[in-house]
Image (cartoon, grey):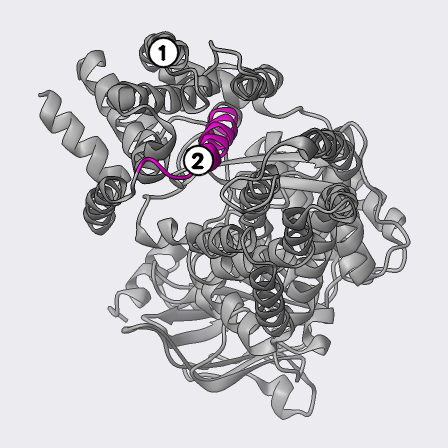
Amino acid sequence: MLFEVLKFVVRTRFSKPLLIFMAVMLVYFIGISAAIPSEEGNRIFGYYGTGIVALFLAMALATGGVMVYKSDRDYLFTLPLSPRDLSISIYFSQFIAFGITILFMFGYLYQSLNSALLLADLVALALTFTSLGVIAPSMTARVRAVLSVALALWTLLAFANFPLSPGSAFYGNVYGGTATLIALAAVTTAAAFRSLSRVELDMMRSLVKSTSSEIKSPNSYVGKSPVGAIYSMNLNTISLAGRMNMAGSSRYVSRRIRTRWVVAASSVAAAAYFVYGLSRASAPAVGGHGAFPGALLASLGLSIIALFLASSAVTNERLWLSLTSLPTATYFRHLVASRVISLMLILAPFAVADAALAALGYGEALAALVVTLAVIPSSYVLEVCWTAYVAPIQVKGDDITMAAQFNLRQMSIILPLFVVIIIVSAASVLLSVAVVGGVILTAVSAILTTSSGFWGRVATKLTEDGFV
Amino acid sequence: MLNTTIGSGQKPGACMKAGSNGARNGIELSHVSKSYGSVLALNDLSFEIPEGGRFALLGPNGAGKSTTLKLLIGSLRVDTGYAKILGAAPDSRESKAVVGYLPEDALPYRMLSVRENLEYIAALRGVQDVRGRTDFLLDELDLRQYEKSNVGRLSRGNTQKLAIALAIIHSPKVLLLDEPLNYLDIPTQEKVIALLDRLEGTHLVSTHIMSIAHRLTDSVVMISKGMFLWEGTIEELRRKGSPEEPIEKVVARMMTGAV
């Protein structure tokens, strides 16, 4: 019976082409890992591995969720199935959407892991990622946020040579790091299976706790012009909504937060980044790439966050209201422009830090500055356009269940991220790549933003997809 | 209201004496076809509603009612033919200024409060007295106690009331409603009916429920399989059956081609 339930749960959550694609990619990434010589660049990959693990662990907990449909709650959970079979099936789906991300990163993580313990580290990481997503809905938003930050900081302690951190295995403390990862995987996996046995209850509880019933400090639009209202809404608050879980499972969450708080948090992070940059002043250059690989890491992290933010531009839209109020292209242009300005407010502290570090002679910080000011904002626009035209899904009712099946089109929303990763990685070696990449992406995003024809097609597409 | 101009026309636009008398049509569709890929949703559909007319748009599931409304608000484009709102193209600025639209299962911005939704859409629509209009609708639809509430946490009934308020916040001259009384309790239905009744302008109400059509409108456009089927007053529709026959039966017979 387990196999039947497993097959049903997996097939209802993932399209067949996507499963085939993931299998092919898995083989490809494992092949890549074998092809990359492990002796070179361990230090760079140590930064990369530790940083990415910190980011992913934090996001797994902050944005995770269980891949469950409303129809599961209405029908599947009411069937006389073994709770064990159901839990294993949902956990396996969760693994495909989420934990498998670690295996996709295999080729890169391989560089920073001791090959003797490679398998143990990867399995432990994959289980931890999967499990954190499963247990996340049982916590309140505040607890998730606090634990996410704590988890990220604990991981980053590896940079201070702390041996018992989830990142330590990537940064020289192989045995302590591996032991920590295994312990973390054991604890979170046990918690995940306990959580899956009461998944419906946790989802309902999460739904009740997920949003405050009252808006504490509402915006006023009295006296605003039509266009002014769009800017007022998007500059005062940031709506966080969209596809969550790293592999792109189409489960959606939505939150709203004051822009000034995000900018304050960004300023603190940028200050820490600046101080860390200064502390690297005396460090030896790595592989001739300069002394500050943190700039590359920060750029990648900001890119990922920006592209996650981008999907909320469309998922939360109510086109039956906005497009019946203003001409289509006018509305979309100002929507995109206001959101880019909002993003740039968040990025500004990092731009200042990069500029200061560049003035102190860090070549990589100069490249990071170009990335922050041009590549990230323009790729954000491209991501908005891409998600609107290729893979739009609207946040409708309760945001705890999956909105749609996860398919190749949904997967494609991470393509712009790969473009950015390539540019950012190349820019750390060659400043001109950042400049040329920034110019090209900015030009393309400007053309799309100002094109009436493009937004007309987007409106038709969104209407046909049920947004109106 | 319009009964004097509504004939027993069985042909599209045959009852549109208002249009032929020189008055503007509130809504006009002429030989409109629309496909979604290989699926033909509307097939040479034509009908007219005179300015000020109150019409129900009836049709079985998949008849093309929602597609018709989406064409009229300009979010879809016709493949052939044309649609007009008070003489203007649906995607024009002139048309958007006068149209109000309520889709079926309408969802307002779920991360804004009730008041923020009303004020934001009023501002987008260029309403002069944003605060006054917002306060009026909050009171009129008993939403005052929820004005600070996150819309994502509202009951479905209160969400529907807010959606109706958003559709009419700018006092539209042409109002397109898709199942407007869904989710509303009976006292609220009466309140909404009274509110809509007081609104001047052309109304087109898509519904499956004849009692709602009867309360909100006085005439009917019937379509099936994307094609025009019949047009006339509700009284004319009633006379198509025997005196004791429920009007729903008459409609069902017409839609299934028995008449």
Look at mark 1 in the image and give the residue it sits on: A175
Q: Say which amino acid is labelled 1.
A: Tyr
In front of the other: A174 or A203: A174
The chain letter for the residue carrying disc 1 is A
Quadrant in which the N terminus of chain B is drawn:
bottom right
The verdict on a common chain for dots 2 and 1 is: yes
> Which x, y percent locates residue B112?
70, 39
Residue flagged by tag 2: what amino acid is it? Phe
Q: Residue at 31% across / 39% down in the picture?
A: A107
Is A385 situated above or below A157?
Answer: below
Q: Residue A356: horizontal and vertical position, in percent?
A: 79, 44
| Residue density around tag 2, few if under 14, some if 14–19, many if 20 or more, within 10 Å | many
- Give the quadrant of the C terminus of chain B: bottom left
Main secondary structure type of the part rendered in magenta: helix
Q: Is residue B78 visible?
A: yes
Nearer the observer, B123 or A161: A161
- Residue drawn 22% across the image and 34% down it: A10
Viewer-proximal residue, B193 or B41?
B41
Query: Can the viewer see residue B244 in this picture?
Result: no
Identify the residue at image location x=53%, y=25%.
A62
A193 to the left or right of A459:
left
* Residue A243 colored in magenta in the image: no
With respect to residue A105, does B223 lie above or below?
below
Horizontal and vertical percent for residue B142?
Answer: 74, 35
Residue under numbered circle 2 = A45
Give x and y (percent) for residue A447: 61, 74
Image: magenta residue range: A38-59
- Residue A16 in the image: above or below residue B173: above
